[in-house]
Amino acid sequence: MYPILLKFGFIQIYSYGLMVALAFWVCAFLLSKQARSLEVEKDFFWNMSGWLLLGGILGGRLLYIIFNLNYFRENPREIFALWQGGLIWYGALVGGALSGIIYLKLKKVNILKALDLIMPFAALGQAIGRIGCFLNGCCYGSPDLIIPAQLISSFNLTAIFITLRLLQEKKHKEGDVLAAYLLLSSFERFMVEFLRDDSARNYMGRTILQVISALIFLSAVFLWSVISGLKKKTPVQG
C-alpha cells in the first residue's frame, strides 16, 4: 500500500487525503455543469460542496470515533489525524446531508430536486474515495481471500453512478433518484462487507455496518413507496 504518495522535505502528500480532495473537486466541477437544471448560478454547487465536505468529514469522523472509542480514549491526539483515513461513509452521509439541507433551506432551493441531482455524484465521490482507501490500506478485504475489497467497492459505486445518471435522464418523480441511491448504495455496502475483514461480526454473524445498511435499505423502500403513492399528485421530471 502507499499511504504516503510523495515527500517534499517535511511536506508529505497522503494518498487518502489526496483522493478525498480529488473526489470533492471532481464532483463539485461536474455538479456546476448541472446548475442550469436547478436554475441556480454555477458557483452554487461549489459553495454547497464546501458545506457538504465539512459536514461529511465531521459526520464520518464522529461515527468512526464512536465505533473505535476505546482506541481514541487511549490515543486522543489521533482524533484529528484525518490524513491517515478513518471516515465511515454513513456518518459522512448524515453529516453531509444535514449541512446540505441547511444550505438548501437558506438558499430556498427545492430540497428533493436538489438531492436527486446530487446523489449520482455522491456515488462517484465514494468510488474515488475507495481508491484512496486502497492506497492507504484501510477498509481491507479478508487476507484469506486476497480480495481488494476497496477496488471492488469502487467499481460497484461507479456502476451506481452510471445507473443513477441514466435514471436522471429519464422521466422520474422528485425523490426517485435519491431513493434509488439509498437502495443501491446500501445494498452494495451490505454485500461488500462480506469481503471485508475490518469489522467485528457481532450481530448474528453480521457487522454493525451491515445492520445499518439493512435499515437504510428498508427506509429507502418505504421512501420509494411514498413517492409511488404520490405519482398522481406531482409532475414528472425529465
Image (cartoon, grey):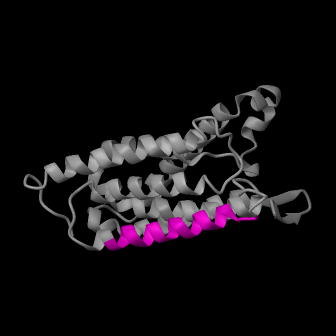
User: Which residue in the rendered view is the most extreme toward the right?
Assistant: 9
Q: Quadrant of the C terminus?
A: bottom left
Residue 30 appears in the figure: yes
Q: Residue furthest front?
A: 204
Query: For the point 35% across and 43% down, which residue is it?
Result: 219
Residue nearer the viewer, 236 or 184: 184
Q: In the rendering, at what x and y percent does residue 229 appear?
A: 14, 49
Q: What residue range appears in magenta?
A: 146-166
Quarter of the view holding residue 173: bottom left
Residue 60, position in %: x, y?
59, 43
Q: Quadrant of residue 91?
A: top right
Do we see residue 110 in this rendering? no
x 74%, y 51%: residue: 83
Image quadrant occupied by the N terminus? bottom right
Q: In which quarter of the image is residue 176?
A: bottom left
Q: In this view, does 41 lie above or below 227?
A: below
On screen, residue 109 versus residue 212, left or right, reads: left
Q: Residue at x 77, y 25 (%)?
A: 73
Based on the picture, tell me whether residue 154 belongs to the magenta stretch. yes
From the viewer's side, name the closer residue of 63 and 46: 63
Is 175 magenta? The answer is no
Residue 182's spot in the image, x, y percent?
Answer: 40, 52
Image coordinates of residue 25 in percent, x first then y, are 55, 64
* Count of numbered circles on the image: 0
Q: Residue at x 38, y 40 (%)?
A: 102
Q: Is residue 91 left or right of residue 147?
A: left
Provide the major secondary structure of the magenta segment.
helix
